[in-house]
Amino acid sequence: METIFISCIALVFYTYFGYGLVVWLLVRMRERRKTQFDERFTPDVTLIIPAYNERSILVDKVANSLAQDYPKDRLHILVVTEGSTDGSAEFLRANYAGLIDVMGGTERYGKVAAMNRAMDRVKTSIVIFTDANTQLNLKAVSHLVRHFYDPTVGAVAGEKRIATQQSESAAGSGEGLYWKYESFLKRLDSDLKTIVGAAGELFAVRTALYEHTETDTILDDFIISLRIAGKGYRVAYEPDAYALEAPSFSIKDEQKRKVRIAAGGFQSIARLTYLLNPFRYGLLTFEYISHRVMRWAVAPFCLPLIFLANGWLAGKALSHPTPAGTVWIGLLIGQCLFYGAAAIGYWLENKQMRWKLFFVPFYFTFMNVCAIAGLVRYLRGKQSGAWEKVRRADSVPINV
């Protein structure tokens, strides 16, 4: 039991803190990568916006896209409204004729199918994907595109940012903190070799490297970018190109999203097993396992083992008191307090009584419970490629 406890503690620590420290040290020991840019490099680019029943926000999205600080004659905007029943396609064609292209369709096949269809129409060498419910900073396109001046770069990931307010819910606060830490790790991954997984809110790829993705894929951004990395290309990271979106409307909406992402994580692991070969992929395998596989498939399952092993050791210490046994009892009390704080945070959130003091233990526990639920969902085959809209907070301004 001591071995189980210590081993699981080590795995969880490495997943959330140790990996970042190791990569930071490796980056410090290496010569810093120097990115070469040429401001004259402004190739034709297609900005693809998949949108399912998003008419209410498409006006802001299209305006934001048209306002991008990039040569107007070289930026082509394509909105894919496949399966929408809210008149999105008709509205866009009537109001933005000559400014953007629109792909409609009456059948709802899912986001990935829409992306595949859109790519069949693309004639530019670079394509950028962005979600309809986000706002991009005005230099996002130019900052992404400049990386492709380097022929070793096959894709570029922008940064996802969560719009937060002082009075925001624990879900949004936790989500924002999580993405800040993720952004820090992505910077390190990019400096070491390549990032392992782009955020679907904003990422760019070389058109020639795009592979039609299985239409039931949940994490299309992750699969697409990792397959490009598997071909030997770098997936660069550009924090100065960011997509800003509101946090989830409620913890139930965030739970729905997180469970779906976790199910997609296990689906991705099954489809990218070849990347687990360190003899072929080297640092990519190290980054992929440490940053993604362990986050989805190892750490969440260590946490209950840690608690159970600690409970057994504390029980043994109570029945056979020893000076060392008090350590096990103290650790168990600490765990109970931590999960108790998480439970209080969950209860307060449901009551809309929002105390940020509890959001760290709450969100940490919440993410890992969702990961376990995601495995159950994946094993039951409940996932599909059809878009599952999650409500977002509508009181948070996301103008850039």
Image (spheres, rainbow, N blue to C red):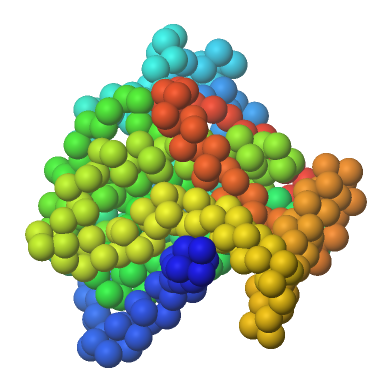
Furthest residue toward top: 106
In this rendered view, identify the residue nearer to me: 90 or 135: 135
Residue 92 image offset from top left, x and y in percent: 51, 25
Left or right, 251 with reference to 205: right
Camera-side residue of 279 and 152: 279
Residue extending farthest to the front is 320
Residue 252 vs 66, above or below: the answer is: above
Q: Residue at x 35, y 31 (%)?
A: 217
Residue at (85% x, 60% y) in the render: 355
Please tell me which residue lies in front, 329 or 78: 329
| Residue 200 location (% of width, % of height) | 43, 45
When the figure is inspected, residue 3 is found, relative to residue 275, above or below; the finding is: below
Image quadrant assignment for residue 173: bottom right
* Residue drawn where x is 43% and y is 19% of the image: 82
| Residue 28 to residue 321: above or below | below
- Give coordinates of residue 280: x percent, y percent: 10, 59
Left or right, residue 62 beside residue 119: right
Look at 26% across and 32% down and name the residue there.
213
Looking at the rendered image, the quarter that the C terminus falls into is bottom right
Q: Is residue 146 visible?
A: no
Image coordinates of residue 126 in percent, x first then y, are: 24, 48
